[in-house]
């Protein structure tokens, strides 16, 4: 079994996102999106059970490749990466088009994602990839039990439901249900010798087009901040007064 | 502009998100066709001012790719060029599938849009709501995924006059079992007048008992940040923020929440925001009507006692 797991390098999430001409500014050093750690964890659990190969797919500015290394440190076997000027500010469909092509060339049976990236959060890439590849899409997975069959629990609007994982499919994993592993020193050292193959854009048949023009970013004056008090032991009274004042109680 | 709403049912009628999109289109004077996805029998989803098609799915099958095939047909037959869905699990799945069929990338997390000739200008909320990002969608097909609570819901007299299609499974259909309906008791995040949310500042899961007690006293719904949902303190269905729910209650009480932009996106439009946090510099204070700098774990018990 071959498992592709898609991972994105994003700017340090502790720092507010900034934009350059509508595109997110990306420093040389980007980190692995925490959202992707859940997908990687699921891939690794499948690898342990079925002796699968886990291949990281990543698109975007490579820089120092710190985020790619972080994915490999968790236990993935190798990475296929792509960076091209024509993909800066790619929309979700272009991204899916590229990732689908990469998954195909990796001959992946199962393709795993987080539900949405923490910087662009379009939230539709897994679905689009499943459509490009004509595979079942098991979205919003929040739990996995691996026995003879692999049972996936999906989040739904009313609760949850279970499905048996098809042999070939696309999965998106929510940020709950699995506990992403932390690499130890040995894992970190081992990752350094794992192969990272850079794919050329010329090998991708790109049919998706840019259909979105950046217009502008407007700041909205948000003078919302009201009164602020340091608690001296009786601020509960203040809260009660305010709740009464606005007729909430 | 011929528009199509991808709607969903809820409790035998149209979901709130569907009504909000209908409300926006009505206020822009735009006609629309409505397709509604659901597994209920004979929901009230039709109306006098629009054509509706009910796509009935079997709750024991995951067959949204087949639903998308049906919607694609309706789009072509009715020469639709703008397609709108609410940002729900189903809405995102279907729009993702259709975007490949129509070779048109959707705009996600839209909070507003305007028409400009043949183009559509969409607004996204960024920087925790302090800035808006405007995009022009230039393709023939325009697909928009709308954040809940962006528009006032339409007031429509709903009836049972609509075409109904039973969705057939296809080769990608996966069967579903163990359908679990989460017991929903007490006030719900979506429509409660008061929401109390907990963050990392609650220190440990046991301390959520204070939040529960306070919620009981105030008849409030309970939410949480992504950090505590990831930590397993609360189910995902209670997550407020970018990747969770958007709430807009009369009062939002943020307990031990620093207020990362991802959280603010889900609650900043609450009418009155009370924030309690130890850190005086916490970003949540920038949007709070009443900010209390102090230890949540001291303040909440006293508040409960004195209410």
Image: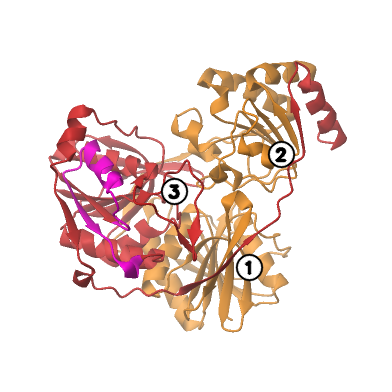
Chain colours: A red, B orange
Residue bearing mark 3: A118
Give the CA distance from mark 2 to mark 3. Answer: 24 Å
Q: Is residue B212 magenta?
A: no
Point 68% across, 44% down: residue: B191
Name the residue rendered at 43%, 77% in the picture.
B73
* Residue A160, image x, y percentages: 44, 41
Disc 2 crowd, CA 10 A, few/some/many (<14, 14-19, 20+): many
Residue reaching furthest to the right: A245
Count of numbered circles in the view = 3
The residue depicted at 70 percent of the width and 77 percent of the height is: B29
Tell me which corner region of the image, top left, top right, bottom left or bottom right, holds residue B257: top right
Disc number placed over residue B201 in the picture, else none: none
**Mark 2 lies on residue:** B288
> Looking at this rendering, what residue extends furthest in the front direction?
A28
Image quadrant where residue B125 sits: bottom right
- A208 left or right, relative to A191: right
Whether B170 is drawn above or below A180: the answer is: below
Q: Earlier in the sequence, mark 1 or mark 2?
A: 1
**Foreground tag (3 vs 1):** 3
| Chain of the residue under label 1 | B
In reply to whether residue A72 is colored magenta, the answer given is yes
Quarter-of-image position of residue B295 = top right
Chain letter of disc 3? A
Magenta span:
A59-87
Q: Is residue A219 left or right of residue A17?
A: right
């Amino acid at each position: 079994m071959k498992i592709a797991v898609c991972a994105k390098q994003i700017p340090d999430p502790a720092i507010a996102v900034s934009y350059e001409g509508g595109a997110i500014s990306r420093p040389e050093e980007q980190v692995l999106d925490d959202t992707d750690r859940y997908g990687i964890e699921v891939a690794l659990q499948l690898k342990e059970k079925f002796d699968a190969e886990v291949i990281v797919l990543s698109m975007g500015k490579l820089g120092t490749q710190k985020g790619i290394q972080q994915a490999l440190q968790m236990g993935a076997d190798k990475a296929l990466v792509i960076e091209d000027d024509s993909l800066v500010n790619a929309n979700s469909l272009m991204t899916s088009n590229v990732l689908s092509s990469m998954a195909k060339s990796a001959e992946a049976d199962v393709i795993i994602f987080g539900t949405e990236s923490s910087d662009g959060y379009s939230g539709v890439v897994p679905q689009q990839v499943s459509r490009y590849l004509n595979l079942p899409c098991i979205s919003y997975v929040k739990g996995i039990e691996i026995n003879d069959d692999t049972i996936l629990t999906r989040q739904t609007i009313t609760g949850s439901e279970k499905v048996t994982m098809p042999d070939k499919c696309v999965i998106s994993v929510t940020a709950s249900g699995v506990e992403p592993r932390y690499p130890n020193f040995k894992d970190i050292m081992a990752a350094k010798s794992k192969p990272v193959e850079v794919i050329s854009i010329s090998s991708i048949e790109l049919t998706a087009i840019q259909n979105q023009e950046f217009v502008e970013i407007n700041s909205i004056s948000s003078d919302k901040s009201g009164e602020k008090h340091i608690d001296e032991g009786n601020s509960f009274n203040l809260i009660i007064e305010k709740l009464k004042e606005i007729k909430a109680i | 502009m011929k528009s199509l709403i991808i709607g969903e049912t809820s409790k035998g009628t149209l979901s709130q998100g569907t009504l909000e999109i209908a409300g926006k289109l009505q206020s822009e004077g735009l006609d629309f066709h409505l397709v509604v996805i659901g597994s209920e029998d004979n929901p009230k989803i039709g109306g006098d001012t629009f054509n509706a098609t009910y796509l009935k799915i079997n709750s024991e099958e995951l067959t949204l790719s087949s639903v998308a095939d049906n919607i694609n047909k309706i789009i072509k037959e009715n020469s639709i060029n703008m397609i709108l869905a609410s940002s729900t699990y189903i809405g995102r799945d279907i729009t993702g599938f259709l975007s490949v069929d129509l070779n048109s990338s959707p705009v996600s997390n839209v909070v507003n849009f305007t028409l400009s000739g043949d183009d559509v200008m969409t607004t996204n909320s960024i920087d925790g709501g302090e800035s808006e990002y405007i995009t022009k969608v230039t393709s023939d097909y325009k697909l928009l995924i709308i954040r809940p609570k962006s528009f006032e819901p339409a007031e429509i007299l709903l009836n049972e006059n609509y075409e109904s299609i039973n969705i057939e499974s296809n080769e990608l259909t996966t069967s579903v079992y163990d359908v679990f309906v989460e017991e929903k008791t007490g006030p719900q995040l979506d429509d409660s007048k008061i929401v109390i949310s907990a963050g990392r500042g609650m220190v440990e899961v046991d301390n959520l008992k204070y939040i529960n007690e306070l919620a009981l006293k105030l008849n409030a719904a309970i939410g949480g940040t992504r950090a505590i949902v990831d930590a397993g303190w609360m189910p995902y269905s209670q997550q407020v923020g970018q990747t969770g729910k958007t709430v807009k209650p009369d009062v939002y009480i943020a307990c031990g929440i620093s207020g990362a932009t991802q959280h603010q996106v889900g609650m900043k439009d609450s009418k009155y925001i009370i924030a309690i946090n130890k850190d005086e510099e916490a970003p949540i204070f920038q949007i709070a009507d009443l900010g209390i700098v102090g230890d949540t774990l001291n303040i909440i018990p006293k508040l409960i006692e004195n209410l």
